[in-house]
């Protein structure tokens, strides 16, 4: 019986589409995976059929956004990242396309369709979470990808572009401490999001380094802004309520400011607030938020530059690019007398 592409895939531990892309020398497949597939082909004596397809006429980069029915598309961080990616792709004659869905299964299905039809060169995951099924799938298929955010797994083998979020969290907290605040809370997303977990870590380190009491009940972590509302109200109603809050992003900060208004608390007179991203929201809020500029646009340009480099030079070592951040002072923090 003749050896089939499925036999090669089974021996190599990859999908038939990965074997097909290896036969066509598709740039989306890593060197290690190609070598594994070719060893399986040689061991089984498999001879691929001649292909009329030479190099891909179109060089396509898939921008993977996290699953969401709404929140992702309301977040200006992703818009700026996409703008940065598109700038580099246009200059390098690549085409970019957005891949997302309401859940991870939808995203993986879309990715599978693209790679099975041999129309993709590489991927940029515009987020980083622990136990991400999408990047696990990309890795299992030996596909080239770059993460925006710190890699949660396979750190030495993964190309990623990130900020130093621990340092940024420390600096945001130390800014409030320098203004005389001692009771400082943290409001962030769930810990599965790498950026929020690291900003919280920086907040905790700063509190401990300055001899201030770290109280776990002063840390609120929510899946989204709506989920965190009740916890924020409870925090602000406590007898020994915080005088300042470090918020992991501008969207959550806007929610917190609104809740303060509903409770007749004023920012910054009653409570100071510092956030991250320095988005348009930070500039349009009534209090005008002091915010950490994380350079979302540059995160996008660097991610695009890295994926294109690794597509065109498959033997490059996995790079870790850190984009600098900057604190932008506005009016949402005040000095305690």
Image: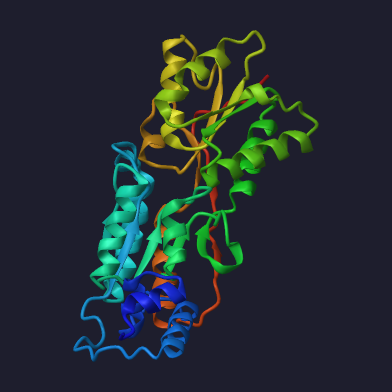
Instruction: Report the colour scheme.
Output: rainbow
Q: Is residue 66 above or below residue 36?
A: above
Q: Is residue 235 above or below residue 108?
A: above
Q: Nearer the viewer, residue 158 or 139?
A: 139
Number of marks drawn: 0
Q: Residue at x 46, y 10 (%)?
A: 263
Q: Residue at x 46, y 71 (%)?
A: 13
Q: Nearer the viewer, residue 312 or 30?
A: 30
Quadrant assignment for the C terminus = top right
Q: Is residue 86 above or below residue 48?
A: above
Whether residue 288 is visible: no
Q: Position of residue 79 (x, y in %)?
A: 32, 50
Whether residue 78 is visible: yes
Q: Position of residue 86 (x, y in %)?
A: 29, 63
Q: Position of residue 122 (x, y in %)?
A: 36, 69
Q: Is residue 78 above or below residue 334?
A: below
Q: Residue at x 30, y 42 (%)?
A: 102
Q: Position of residue 55 (x, y in %)?
A: 26, 85
Residue 317, image quadrant: bottom right
Quadrant assignment for the N terminus = bottom left
Extreme residue toward the right, this view:
211
């Amino acid at each position: 019986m003749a050896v089939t592409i499925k036999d090669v895939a089974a021996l190599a531990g990859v999908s038939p589409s990965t074997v097909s892309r290896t036969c066509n020398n598709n740039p989306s497949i890593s060197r290690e995976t190609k070598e594994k597939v070719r060893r399986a082909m040689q061991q089984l004596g498999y001879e691929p059929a001649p292909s009329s397809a030479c190099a891909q006429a179109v060089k396509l980069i898939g921008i993977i956004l996290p699953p969401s029915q709404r929140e992702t598309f309301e977040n200006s961080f992703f818009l700026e990242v996409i703008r940065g990616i598109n700038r580099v792709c246009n200059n390098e004659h690549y085409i970019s396309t957005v891949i997302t869905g309401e859940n991870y299964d939808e995203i993986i299905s879309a990715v599978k369709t693209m790679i099975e039809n041999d129309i993709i060169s590489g991927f940029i995951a515009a987020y980083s979470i622990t136990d991400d099924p999408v990047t696990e799938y990309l890795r299992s298929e030996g596909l080239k990808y770059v993460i925006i955010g710190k890699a949660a797994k396979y750190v030495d083998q993964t190309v990623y572009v990130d900020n130093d979020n621990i340092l940024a969290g420390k600096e945001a907290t130390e800014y409030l401490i320098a203004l005389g605040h001692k009771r400082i809370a943290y409001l962030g997303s769930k810990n599965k999001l790498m950026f929020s977990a690291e900003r919280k870590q920086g907040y905790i380190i700063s509190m401990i380094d300055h001899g201030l009491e770290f109280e776990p009940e002063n840390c609120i972590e929510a899946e989204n802004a709506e989920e965190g509302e009740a916890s924020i109200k409870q925090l602000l109603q406590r007898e020994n309520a915080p005088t300042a809050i470090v918020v992991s992003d501008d969207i959550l900060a806007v929610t917190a400011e609104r809740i303060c208004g509903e409770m007749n608390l004023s920012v910054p007179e009653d409570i100071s607030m510092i956030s991250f991203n320095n988005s348009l929201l930070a500039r349009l809020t009534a209090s005008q938020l002091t915010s950490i500029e994380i350079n979302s646009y540059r995160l996008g340009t660097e991610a695009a530059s890295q994926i294109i480099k690794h597509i065109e030079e498959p033997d490059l070592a996995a790079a870790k690019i850190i984009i600098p951040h900057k604190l932008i002072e506005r009016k949402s923090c005040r000095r305690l007398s």
